[in-house]
Image: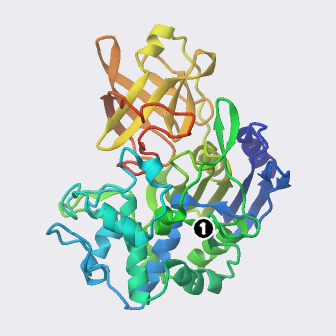
């Protein structure tokens, strides 16, 4: 069992010396907890269970739990107006509630969806100044009318916590969440602070490994600034299972799908993506999706099976969703899938290559090594043809893509099935042109593409 996980992780590490920390918890028992590779390549320092990894968007479940503790204590209410706590936030006449923020139905434009996002994320600004800036952007839709993930939502939740509790976000989290659980290796990862056992992050580029790009962590804030260790996240998972911080009723509410005013529900609760995985309900979240800041992380809690998979890696292209689904399939005894590749010409492959998207979500089908193609959504999956229009990943049986509607020699419609995502249809799009059209030597990527879940979600 452990050897199987070792093989999976070592294969993904690709002999590059970067590191990972992996745990599997089943019915409260830690049945696998192991570290791999190096926390710092330049000094040859290995990863250990207390190594601190940048969590990125995996910060959001922590913020959500802290916020919902305040709800349970009656200190605020989900249906309170945002302006009750942030009276100067410009809502353009809209009624925005805290529930809208928590369920990603606020319509507030994501502050990371701007053309010069990577330059902006390096600027020295306070969270209040950042909120003042993105507050000037028009709303994407009327609050409550639609679902769309926005990094602005939990950013504002952090400011609400600060205003209510009259303390900084990190002081609140440390006092009310981390300290009671004994989480001594969980921090707000200010660049300039000395943090014991902080891992270095790495980006894999065509010319080799590079140190992860600089990010001012106040831009990540309550939806991306935390760092933590494998041992501490195991403690957090234990607290969720044993209802140390939240009651069973509030936990169930946290795992209830978001609902818009027309009655439609979506695969996101309050701080957790929610999906069906081979008949098992899974609440999960990923971090590091921009792919340029040196880390990739995931916690996936399979609620029906009482199984948790935790993966922390200090390389931005580490495929945590694929690793998690492979590990989960093993422990859930999911039947194996046998597929054989179909011979397809380069001309047949070229019909598939391009960008596909819908409503803020985009993915790229690219030529890869050995004349194959791959799908790139932050995590990259190799693809082999099942037939002229369908492709699978030889590395993960939960990846299946089906192309259709050929026009002018290319396919224009794509149906996508990926680990922990709902099946979604996207259409061919033109790639952006100009500064952000291609990866650059400065490690600036294309303007952010959706990389977590569907409908559109993308995270720090």
Counting from the top left corner in percent of width and height, residue 316 is at 61, 46
| Secondary-structure class at tag 1 | loop
Image check: 361 left or right of 460?
Answer: left
Task: Tell me: residue 108, above or below residue 87.
Answer: above
Neighbour class for label 1 at 10 Å: few (<14), some, many (≥20)?
some
Q: Which residue is mark 1?
A: 190
Image check: 164 left or right of 325?
Answer: left
Observer-nearest of 138 and 129: 129
Observer-nearest of 243 and 221: 221
Residue at the far left in the pictured view: 93
Q: In this view of the protein, can residue 81 be seen by the observer?
A: no
Residue at the (67%, 77%) spot, across then down: 183
Q: In this view of the protein, can residue 269 be seen by the observer?
A: yes
Residue at the far bottom in the pictured view: 74
Residue at the (62%, 66%) spot, across then down: 227
Q: Quadrant of residue 181?
A: bottom right
Question: How many marks can you see?
Answer: 1
Counting from the top left corner in percent of width and height, residue 104 is at 33, 62
Residue at the (62%, 21%) spot, across then down: 369
Observer-nearest of 384 and 292: 292
Task: Tell me: residue 334, above or below residue 169.
Answer: above
Residue at the far front in the pictured view: 124
Counting from the top left corner in percent of width and height, residue 27 is at 65, 69
Task: Tell me: residue 326, above or below residue 438.
Answer: below
Counting from the top left corner in percent of width and height, residue 457 is at 40, 51
């Amino acid at each position: 069992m452990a050897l199987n996980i070792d093989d999976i992780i070592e294969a993904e590490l690709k002999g590059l010396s970067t590191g990972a920390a992996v745990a599997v918890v089943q019915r409260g028992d830690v049945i696998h907890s192991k570290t791999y590779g190096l926390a710092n390549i330049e000094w040859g320092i290995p990863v250990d269970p207390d190594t601190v990894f940048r969590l990125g968007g995996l910060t959001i479940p922590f913020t959500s739990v802290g916020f919902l503790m305040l709800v349970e204590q009656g200190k605020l209410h989900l249906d309170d107006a945002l302006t009750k706590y942030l009276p100067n936030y410009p809502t353009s006449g809209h009624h925005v509630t805290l529930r809208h923020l928590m369920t990603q139905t606020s319509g507030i434009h994501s502050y990371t969806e701007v053309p010069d996002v990577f330059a902006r994320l390096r600027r020295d600004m306070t969270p209040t100044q950042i909120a003042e800036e993105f507050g000037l952007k028009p709303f994407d839709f009327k609050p409550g009318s639609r679902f769309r993930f926005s990094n602005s939502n939990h950013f504002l939740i952090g400011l609400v916590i600060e205003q209510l509790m009259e303390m900084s976000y990190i002081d609140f989290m440390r006092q009310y969440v981390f300290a009671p659980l004994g989480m001594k290796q969980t921090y707000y990862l200010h660049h300039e602070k000395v943090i014991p056992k902080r891992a270095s992050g790495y980006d894999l580029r065509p010319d080799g490994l590079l140190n992860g790009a600089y990010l001012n962590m106040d831009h990540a804030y309550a939806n991306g600034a935390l760092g933590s260790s494998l041992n501490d996240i195991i403690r957090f998972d234990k607290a969720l299972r044993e209802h140390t911080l939240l009651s069973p009723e509030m936990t169930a509410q946290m795992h209830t799908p978001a609902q818009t005013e027309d009655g439609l529900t979506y695969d996101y609760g309050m701080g957790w993506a929610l999906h069906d995985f081979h008949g098992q309900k899974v609440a999960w979240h990923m971090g590091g999706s921009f792919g340029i800041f040196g880390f990739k992380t995931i916690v996936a809690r399979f609620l029906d099976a009482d199984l948790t998979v935790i993966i922390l890696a200090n390389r931005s292209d580490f495929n945590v969703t694929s690793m998690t689904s492979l590990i989960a399939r093993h422990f859930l005894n999911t039947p194996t899938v046998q597929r054989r590749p179909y011979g397809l010409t380069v001309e047949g492959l070229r019909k598939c290559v391009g960008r596909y998207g819908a409503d803020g979500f985009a993915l790229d089908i690219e030529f890869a090594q050995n004349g194959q193609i791959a799908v790139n959504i932050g995590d990259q999956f190799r693809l082999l043809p099942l037939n002229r229009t369908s492709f699978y990943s030889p590395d993960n049986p939960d990846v299946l893509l089906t192309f259709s509607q050929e026009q002018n020699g290319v396919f224009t419609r794509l149906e996508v099935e990926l680990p922990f995502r709902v099946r979604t249809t996207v259409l061919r799009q033109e790639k952006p042109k100009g500064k952000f059209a291609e990866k650059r030597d400065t490690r600036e990527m294309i303007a952010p593409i959706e990389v977590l879940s569907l409908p559109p979600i993308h995270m720090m």
